[in-house]
Amino acid sequence: QVQLVESGRGVVQPGRSLRLSCAASGFTFSNYGMHWVRQAPGKGLEWVAVIWYDGNNKYYADSVKGRFTISRDNSKNTLYLQMNSLRVEDTAVYYCARDLDRYDSRGWFDPWGQGTLVTVSS
Amino acid sequence: EIVLTQSPATLSLSPGERATLSCRASQSISSFVAWYQQKPGQAPRLLIYDASNRATGIPARFSGSGSGTDFTLTISSLEPEDFAVYYCQHRYNWPPLTFGGGTKVEIK
Protein backbone atom coordinates (compact mmCIF):
# COMPACT_ATOMS: atom_id res chain seq x y z
CA GLN A 1 0.00 0.00 0.00
CA VAL A 2 1.03 3.63 -0.41
CA GLN A 3 3.23 4.75 2.44
CA LEU A 4 5.00 8.00 3.26
CA VAL A 5 7.37 8.09 6.21
CA GLU A 6 8.92 11.36 7.37
CA SER A 7 12.14 11.62 9.34
CA GLY A 8 14.44 14.33 10.63
CA ARG A 9 12.51 15.51 13.66
CA GLY A 10 14.35 17.51 16.24
CA VAL A 11 14.84 20.53 18.42
CA VAL A 12 16.94 23.28 16.88
CA GLN A 13 17.88 26.79 17.87
CA PRO A 14 16.61 29.80 15.94
CA GLY A 15 18.78 30.56 12.94
CA ARG A 16 19.98 26.97 12.55
CA SER A 17 19.18 24.45 9.81
CA LEU A 18 17.44 21.10 9.59
CA ARG A 19 16.67 18.69 6.75
CA LEU A 20 13.54 16.57 6.66
CA SER A 21 13.15 13.45 4.55
CA CYS A 22 10.09 11.59 3.35
CA ALA A 23 10.52 8.01 2.16
CA ALA A 24 7.85 6.85 -0.27
CA SER A 25 6.78 3.32 -1.10
CA GLY A 26 3.89 1.46 -2.67
CA PHE A 27 3.62 3.65 -5.76
CA THR A 28 5.73 5.01 -8.63
CA PHE A 29 7.25 7.98 -6.83
CA SER A 30 8.64 9.57 -10.00
CA ASN A 31 5.12 9.97 -11.42
CA TYR A 32 3.72 12.23 -8.70
CA GLY A 33 4.12 15.76 -7.47
CA MET A 34 4.87 15.99 -3.76
CA HIS A 35 4.08 18.56 -1.09
CA TRP A 36 5.08 19.59 2.40
CA VAL A 37 2.32 20.81 4.71
CA ARG A 38 2.82 21.89 8.31
CA GLN A 39 0.71 22.29 11.41
CA ALA A 40 1.78 24.39 14.38
CA PRO A 41 0.81 22.93 17.78
CA GLY A 42 -2.93 23.27 18.27
CA LYS A 43 -3.33 25.19 15.01
CA GLY A 44 -4.58 24.60 11.49
CA LEU A 45 -2.87 23.41 8.34
CA GLU A 46 -0.43 25.46 6.26
CA TRP A 47 0.87 24.44 2.85
CA VAL A 48 4.64 24.87 2.66
CA ALA A 49 5.95 23.78 -0.75
CA VAL A 50 5.40 21.60 -3.81
CA ILE A 51 7.74 19.94 -6.26
CA TRP A 52 6.63 18.61 -9.60
CA TYR A 53 7.00 14.90 -10.40
CA ASP A 54 10.17 15.54 -12.44
CA GLY A 55 11.59 18.17 -10.11
CA ASN A 56 11.36 20.87 -12.76
CA ASN A 57 8.92 23.10 -10.90
CA LYS A 58 8.98 24.15 -7.28
CA TYR A 59 6.76 26.61 -5.43
CA TYR A 60 6.76 27.89 -1.87
CA ALA A 61 4.56 29.64 0.63
CA ASP A 62 5.63 33.24 1.20
CA SER A 63 6.35 32.41 4.84
CA VAL A 64 9.22 30.08 3.88
CA LYS A 65 10.37 31.44 0.53
CA GLY A 66 14.11 32.02 0.46
CA ARG A 67 14.68 29.92 3.59
CA PHE A 68 13.31 26.47 2.70
CA THR A 69 14.19 24.32 -0.31
CA ILE A 70 12.18 21.35 -1.51
CA SER A 71 13.91 18.64 -3.52
CA ARG A 72 13.54 15.01 -4.47
CA ASP A 73 15.63 12.03 -5.48
CA ASN A 74 13.50 9.83 -7.70
CA SER A 75 16.15 7.10 -7.70
CA LYS A 76 15.77 6.85 -3.92
CA ASN A 77 12.00 7.47 -3.76
CA THR A 78 12.67 10.25 -1.30
CA LEU A 79 11.43 13.80 -0.83
CA TYR A 80 13.38 16.40 1.13
CA LEU A 81 12.84 19.73 2.81
CA GLN A 82 15.95 21.74 3.65
CA MET A 83 15.06 24.32 6.25
CA ASN A 84 17.51 27.16 6.87
CA SER A 85 17.35 30.24 9.09
CA LEU A 86 14.72 28.58 11.22
CA ARG A 87 12.42 30.74 13.32
CA VAL A 88 10.38 30.00 16.41
CA GLU A 89 7.25 30.29 14.27
CA ASP A 90 8.44 27.37 12.11
CA THR A 91 7.71 25.05 15.03
CA ALA A 92 5.20 22.52 13.69
CA VAL A 93 4.49 18.99 12.66
CA TYR A 94 5.64 18.68 9.08
CA TYR A 95 3.72 16.34 6.80
CA CYS A 96 4.73 15.17 3.37
CA ALA A 97 1.83 14.46 1.05
CA ARG A 98 1.46 13.08 -2.42
CA ASP A 99 -0.52 14.90 -5.04
CA LEU A 100 -3.76 13.15 -5.94
CA ASP A 101 -3.04 12.67 -9.65
CA ARG A 102 -0.05 11.48 -11.59
CA TYR A 103 2.04 14.02 -13.48
CA ASP A 104 -0.39 16.96 -13.29
CA SER A 105 0.01 18.48 -9.82
CA ARG A 106 -3.55 19.48 -9.10
CA GLY A 107 -2.96 20.55 -5.54
CA TRP A 108 -4.96 17.92 -3.68
CA PHE A 109 -3.16 15.97 -0.97
CA ASP A 110 -3.60 12.22 -0.89
CA PRO A 111 -2.22 10.43 1.02
CA TRP A 112 -0.27 12.04 3.86
CA GLY A 113 2.63 10.81 5.95
CA GLN A 114 2.34 10.54 9.72
CA GLY A 115 4.27 13.77 10.25
CA THR A 116 7.47 14.73 12.03
CA LEU A 117 7.78 17.36 14.75
CA VAL A 118 10.19 20.23 14.38
CA THR A 119 10.71 22.46 17.40
CA VAL A 120 12.62 25.71 17.06
CA SER A 121 13.58 27.02 20.45
CA SER A 122 16.53 28.61 22.22
CA GLU B 1 -4.53 35.55 -1.33
CA ILE B 2 -7.82 33.71 -1.14
CA VAL B 3 -9.17 33.28 2.40
CA LEU B 4 -11.40 30.35 3.34
CA THR B 5 -13.70 30.83 6.32
CA GLN B 6 -15.22 27.75 7.91
CA SER B 7 -18.30 27.74 10.10
CA PRO B 8 -19.22 26.90 12.69
CA ALA B 9 -15.97 26.56 14.60
CA THR B 10 -17.51 23.75 16.64
CA LEU B 11 -20.50 21.56 15.88
CA SER B 12 -21.97 19.51 18.74
CA LEU B 13 -24.06 16.61 17.50
CA SER B 14 -25.08 13.10 18.46
CA PRO B 15 -24.31 9.90 16.54
CA GLY B 16 -26.89 9.38 13.83
CA GLU B 17 -27.48 13.09 13.31
CA ARG B 18 -26.76 14.99 10.12
CA ALA B 19 -23.74 17.32 10.06
CA THR B 20 -23.53 20.32 7.76
CA LEU B 21 -20.20 22.15 7.57
CA SER B 22 -19.69 25.38 5.67
CA CYS B 23 -16.68 26.83 3.86
CA ARG B 24 -16.84 30.29 2.33
CA ALA B 25 -14.19 31.74 -0.01
CA SER B 26 -13.20 35.40 -0.18
CA GLN B 27 -13.64 35.26 -3.97
CA SER B 28 -15.04 32.84 -6.50
CA ILE B 29 -12.95 29.68 -6.74
CA SER B 30 -15.10 27.68 -9.15
CA SER B 31 -15.28 24.10 -7.82
CA PHE B 32 -11.67 23.93 -6.68
CA VAL B 33 -12.31 22.87 -3.09
CA ALA B 34 -11.31 19.81 -1.11
CA TRP B 35 -12.27 18.60 2.36
CA TYR B 36 -10.04 16.74 4.82
CA GLN B 37 -10.73 14.94 8.09
CA GLN B 38 -8.20 14.98 10.91
CA LYS B 39 -8.45 12.95 14.10
CA PRO B 40 -6.31 13.71 17.17
CA GLY B 41 -2.70 12.64 16.71
CA GLN B 42 -3.27 11.60 13.10
CA ALA B 43 -2.52 13.04 9.71
CA PRO B 44 -5.36 14.55 7.69
CA ARG B 45 -7.24 12.35 5.23
CA LEU B 46 -8.71 13.51 1.92
CA LEU B 47 -12.49 13.11 1.84
CA ILE B 48 -13.74 15.21 -1.08
CA TYR B 49 -12.01 16.97 -3.99
CA ASP B 50 -13.29 19.22 -6.76
CA ALA B 51 -16.13 20.16 -4.41
CA SER B 52 -18.13 16.96 -4.80
CA ASN B 53 -15.93 13.98 -5.73
CA ARG B 54 -15.40 11.44 -2.97
CA ALA B 55 -11.84 10.21 -2.61
CA THR B 56 -11.08 6.51 -2.81
CA GLY B 57 -12.48 4.53 0.10
CA ILE B 58 -14.56 7.35 1.55
CA PRO B 59 -18.02 6.23 2.71
CA ALA B 60 -21.08 7.48 0.86
CA ARG B 61 -22.37 9.29 3.97
CA PHE B 62 -19.81 12.01 3.16
CA SER B 63 -20.86 14.38 0.39
CA GLY B 64 -19.70 17.75 -0.85
CA SER B 65 -21.47 20.47 -2.74
CA GLY B 66 -21.14 24.07 -3.83
CA SER B 67 -19.37 26.28 -6.32
CA GLY B 68 -18.21 29.86 -6.55
CA THR B 69 -17.78 31.05 -2.98
CA ASP B 70 -19.96 28.74 -0.86
CA PHE B 71 -19.24 25.10 -0.19
CA THR B 72 -20.73 22.48 2.09
CA LEU B 73 -19.58 19.17 3.50
CA THR B 74 -22.46 17.00 4.65
CA ILE B 75 -22.23 13.88 6.77
CA SER B 76 -25.63 12.28 6.41
CA SER B 77 -25.62 10.24 9.62
CA LEU B 78 -22.72 10.62 12.04
CA GLU B 79 -20.83 7.49 13.00
CA PRO B 80 -18.70 7.44 16.20
CA GLU B 81 -15.51 7.56 14.09
CA ASP B 82 -16.63 10.77 12.33
CA PHE B 83 -16.04 13.01 15.34
CA ALA B 84 -12.95 14.93 14.25
CA VAL B 85 -11.77 18.24 12.81
CA TYR B 86 -12.61 19.01 9.19
CA TYR B 87 -10.68 21.39 6.95
CA CYS B 88 -11.55 22.81 3.57
CA GLN B 89 -8.78 23.73 1.11
CA HIS B 90 -8.72 25.44 -2.30
CA ARG B 91 -6.46 25.14 -5.33
CA TYR B 92 -7.74 28.05 -7.42
CA ASN B 93 -4.94 29.90 -9.22
CA TRP B 94 -2.37 28.30 -6.99
CA PRO B 95 0.20 28.67 -5.53
CA PRO B 96 -0.42 29.25 -2.76
CA LEU B 97 -2.72 26.52 -1.55
CA THR B 98 -4.66 27.56 1.52
CA PHE B 99 -6.85 25.92 4.13
CA GLY B 100 -9.78 27.07 6.17
CA GLY B 101 -9.46 27.31 9.93
CA GLY B 102 -11.31 24.05 10.54
CA THR B 103 -14.56 22.87 12.08
CA LYS B 104 -14.52 20.53 15.04
CA VAL B 105 -17.37 18.03 15.12
CA GLU B 106 -17.78 16.90 18.71
CA ILE B 107 -20.07 14.53 20.50
CA LYS B 108 -23.02 16.25 22.14
Image (cartoon, coloured by chain):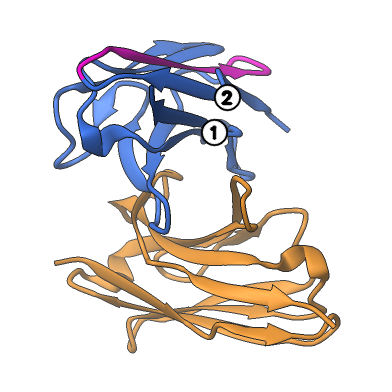
Expressed as whole percent of the image width and height from the top left, the position of residue A52 reads 46, 62
Magenta includes B24? yes
In the picture shown, does residue A77 fall above or below A3? below
Magenta includes A9? no
Chain of the residue that carries numbered disc 2 in the rendered image: B
Q: Amino acid at mark 2?
A: Ala
* Element at label 1: loop
Expressed as whole percent of the image width and height from the top left, the position of residue B12 reads 43, 20
Residue drawn at x 37%, y 40% is B37
- Indicate the quadrant where residue B62 lies: top left
Residue closer to the observer: A41 or A108: A41
Is residue A116 rendered to the left or right of residue B83? right
Q: Find out whether the residues at labels 1 and 2 contact each other: C-beta distance under 8 Å.
A: yes
Expressed as whole percent of the image width and height from the top left, the position of residue A35 reads 48, 60
Do tags 1 and 2 sit on the same chain? yes
Residue drawn at x 70%, y 72% is A68
What's the colour of chain B in the image? Answer: blue
Of marks 1 and 2, which one's residue comes earlier in the chain? 2
Residue closer to the observer: B106 or B98: B106
In the picture shown, does residue A67 fall above or below A52? below
In the picture shown, does residue A28 fall above or below B89? below
- Magenta region: B16-28
- Indicate the quadrant where residue A111 lies: bottom left
Chain of the residue that carries numbered disc 1 in the rendered image: B
Quadrant (top left/top right/bottom left/bottom right) for the C terminus of chain A: bottom right
Q: Which mark is residue B102?
A: 1
* Chain letter matching colour orange: A
Which residue is the site of mark 2?
Answer: B9
Residue closer to the observer: A118 or A101: A118
* Element at label 2: loop
Q: Amino acid at mark 1?
A: Gly
